[in-house]
Image: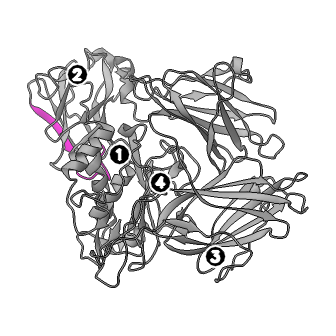
Amino acid sequence: MNQSLPSQRLSFELLEDRLTPAFGTPWYDGTSLTLSFVPDGTDISGETSNLSELLGSALTQSQWKREILRAYQSWSARANLNVGLVADGGQAMGISGAPQADIRFGDIRIGARPLSAPGTDYSTMAGAAGFDYNSKTWAGDLVFNSQYQFGIGGTLGQQSDLFTVALHEAGHSFGFADSHSDSTSVMWARYEGVRTDLAEQDITALQDLYGVRVDDQFEGQSGNGTLATAYNLTTNGNLLAVSGDITRLTDVDYYSFTTPDALSGVGGLTVDLQASGISLLTSRVTVFDSQGQMVASAQSTDPLANNLSFAIPNYQVSSTYVVKVEGSGSDVFSIGAYVLKLNYSSSASTGSGSLDPSAMVTTAYFTNTELTISNTTLTAAATLTPVSTSSLANTFTLTGAIDSSTDVDWFTITPSASTQFTGTLFVGAIMATDGLRPEVSVYNTAGELLSSVVTMNEDGAYQVQLASAVAGTTYHIRVSAADSTSLRSTGTYALGATLAPVGTTQFDDVVSDTLSAAESVQYSKMEVAGDRLTQFALTATGGSTSATTAVRMSVFDSAGHLVFTTVAVAGQSLSTAAVWLPSGDYTVAFNAATQDGSSIESLGLAVEARTLSDPIDPYVENPTSPPAPQSPISIAAPTTDQPVGPILDPITNPFLGLFGFWS
């Protein structure tokens, strides 16, 4: 989002372009999203996050966190979504991992770092990435530009309203692009003052993507909104825990139960409501006796601490109690999912009830574990169970291991859905322990290798996509080491496969060139219009007929410091990597070499890119001037002449440190 600044000079509006991110893809399980705030010092593409320092200068930690959470909750409360707050382990943003359900941090991570300065061309206050099957853990992440001032309320050109900026960026996290035609939408591309809530068209678009918020299973035909219609936990399976949902501000959930008899040895009862990590619900829980008299009550008002626990005074055996669950206020935090638990004080009560499977607080992300050593051929492939038999029957996850340099693992999946569709099958393996560099491929039931496209190959993460995949079709997945002769040919991995009703991931051509022995190092000037998270893909071909050849792409900022590098080996899959690049000019160096030091012959290179964060739309200072399109990232044709500007950090040999196993 860009801030409207006082008139200084003529500038232009950046129109939609080839590198505009493909927003519009929903999270594969929007009902169980998590969010975390990265601690200060966390790496964000070479800069350390300073979120607490930035926002803590004018606000308390509770204040600024609540404003950001209120922005995300303003979206999730209006659709079939939940966002729960979890701790953040401080790993680098964008580290290899699953785009959703990585237990080290939230699915959506919030950080801050310096980007381009206010008043400079295409400067932006913040940027967020939408959900993407090929963006690793960048999916949904929000990065504030710490060169701006944020607070509660705002004055144009001085302080920006934190809630308004976060509300816009939360829309990107949930999959919505900038709007260039509707200034009443919170997705309007420019910051023009304080907003208080979503517009009706925003809510409509949200519900079109995720569906309306759904009543929980305990409502029944008559609902469970009164004492008389309370859902009976005792007669319906003697349940000790249930997973419910306060679906709207007027929603109230009642549950009745009968306590164990005196022979059970139970001497007391504690009622717990867990919302932390599940949703941002702030709730009120009230317990009544069989006469409808209140015996205990508690409430939470802070989404940062929204669990409740209290004991029932004067506990009675063989007695009926009713629990009432509702939102504690009248704002968006009074909507959300929760788990209600009955905790009896004696171990003798363990046989008096059962846990409702829907009330499990944490769902195991990896629903399969490779336990067999016989799945080394297609005919012996292990069949994987989907994450869910209903909403996630199209998604499969597994933890496995390549035990030796000759080991190969085969798996069978049959993605299904309630409505038949043709979409894209995404299959990826991620290194789980420091060692294995995995590779995956997809086959049909006849054992034929299907034509898939590599879309990610970085930091031990390898992913392919298969276009025109059909729900209900059986596919076979082969996992192996990328190079069985390397030092990274064994280790554990996490496998994920999802058939989604979306198009394929597309990269756009940026530049191509040929390096030779006489011109093994070439330079190019790169211009970045707008702070953006960009994923580059580098491919190399040819190079040498007798030795392994590789090319390194190094990007240096205007001060001459290395901000990004990636390496592609000739004849192998493309190499990808994502980086936050502030608006400005950069120097790109391409240098090629052979592994044995011999001369390269003719090495072709190609650079592609795609933007993962929202595009930048500068304030049009002169509305009478026609806007001029500006490519977000452009790289000039490489030459042997170094562009004007320093290169202070060294240009490293492509094989130095490559994948951790080249000498």
Query: Which quadrant is home to the N terminus?
Result: bottom left
How packed mark 4 is, by other alpha carbons closer than 10 Å (few <14, some 14-19, many 20 or more), is some
Residues drawn in magenta: 293-307
How packed mark 2 is, by other alpha carbons closer than 10 Å (few <14, some 14-19, many 20 or more), is many
Q: Which residue is mark 4?
A: 88
Q: What is the spatial separation of the Cα atoms under label 2 and label 3, in whole angstroms?
A: 66 Å
Please, what secondary structure does the residue beneath circle 4 have? loop
Question: Is 430 or 632 nearer to us in this picture?
Answer: 632
How packed mark 1 is, by other alpha carbons closer than 10 Å (few <14, some 14-19, many 20 or more), is many
The location of residue 646, given as percent across then percent down, is 66, 82
In the image, taking residue 379 as reference, residue 505 lies left or right, namely left
Q: Which of the two labelled residues, at mark 2 and mark 4, occupies the earlier sequence position?
A: 4
Q: Which of the two labelled residues, at mark 4 and mark 1, occupies the earlier sequence position?
A: 1
**472 up-or-down from 633: above or below:** above
Q: Which residue is mark 1?
A: 83
Which residue type carries mark 4? Asp
Question: Is 244 or 107 nearer to us in this picture?
Answer: 107
Name the front one of labels 1 and 3: 3
Q: Which of the two labelled residues, at mark 2 and mark 3, occupies the earlier sequence position?
A: 2
- Whether residue 406 is visible to the viewer of this picture, yes or no, is yes
Please, what secondary structure does the residue beneath circle 3 have? loop
Q: Which residue is mark 3?
A: 561
Q: Which residue is mark 2?
A: 257
- The mark found on residue 330 in the picture is none
